[in-house]
Amino acid sequence: MTTATRRSRASMSSWRKGRRVAAAVGAVSLGLITLAACDKPTPLATVTVGTDSVHTEATKGCNGDGDPLSEKELKGCLSKKTGKSIKVAPGEKVRIGVEPEIAESGWVMVSSNPIMKEPSEDNYRSFDSDTLFEQKNPQTGESLGMSKKVTIAVVELTKKDGPKAMWHFELEREK
């Protein structure tokens, strides 16, 4: 039977400790490299209908990173017709939720019809789905029937300089 000397046991223990330290340093370095390569995440907006919900970060090209969107960016963002999709049954409530930093700035929900008269600083608002899907004549306000799909945009506002970010969602009306 062989026994290790105290000196060899100490060097083995030191060697193991060194490996653990090297592994920890490597993991931290890899984590920092990964974080540096990622874009800064934007706050989320969420649409909930019944028990279903979808959420997304600001639409690509529609995030001013705290600064107001330029006129060109704003026009492009307002004309976008895609986003995360959710189905809505007639008469259901559509709930919009925003993170606190969006609520603090103020936000509105935009669609083909005017929906919100004033910006909100609430984290959560409910809307009647029939109002969102109703098509109206822009000149007379007369109802033209119900649309099958509607794109809505949650728009974060600055206190005085206009929109600074947008989140797009597509609502699909169920029969």
Image (spheres, rainbow, N blue to C red):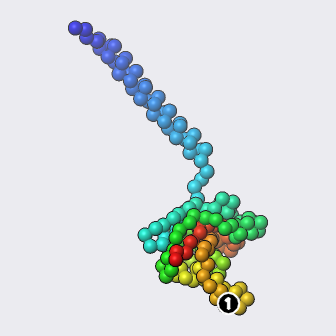
Residue where numbered disc 1 is placed: 141
- Label tally: 1
> Residue 74: image x %, image y %?
72, 68
Query: At x 39% / y 26%, what residue is drawn?
Result: 17
In this orientation, which residue lies closer to the viewer: 175 or 99?
175
Q: Residue furthest left?
A: 1
Can residue 66 be seen? no
Quadrant of the snapshot with the N terminus: top left
Can residue 144 be seen? yes
> Residue 124: image x %, image y %?
50, 74
Q: Is residue 13 left or right of residue 143?
A: left
Query: At x 33% / y 13%, what residue is drawn?
Result: 7
**Callout 1 secondary element:** loop
Query: At x 34% / y 18%, what residue is drawn?
Result: 10
> Residue 22: image x %, image y %?
47, 28
**Quick check: 103 above or below 14?**
below
Q: Residue furthest right?
A: 72
Q: Residue furthest front?
A: 175
* Residue 12, quarter of the rendered image: top left
In this orientation, which residue lies closer to the viewer: 132 or 125?
132
> Residue 68: image x %, image y %?
70, 66
| Classed neighbour count for the residue bearing mark 1: other residues with Cα under 10 Å, few (<14), some (14–19), many (≥20) | few
In this orientation, which residue lies closer to the viewer: 66 or 43?
43
Q: Is residue 89 left or right of residue 77?
A: left
Q: Amino acid at mark 1?
A: Gly
Query: At x 64% / y 76%, what residue is drawn?
Result: 111
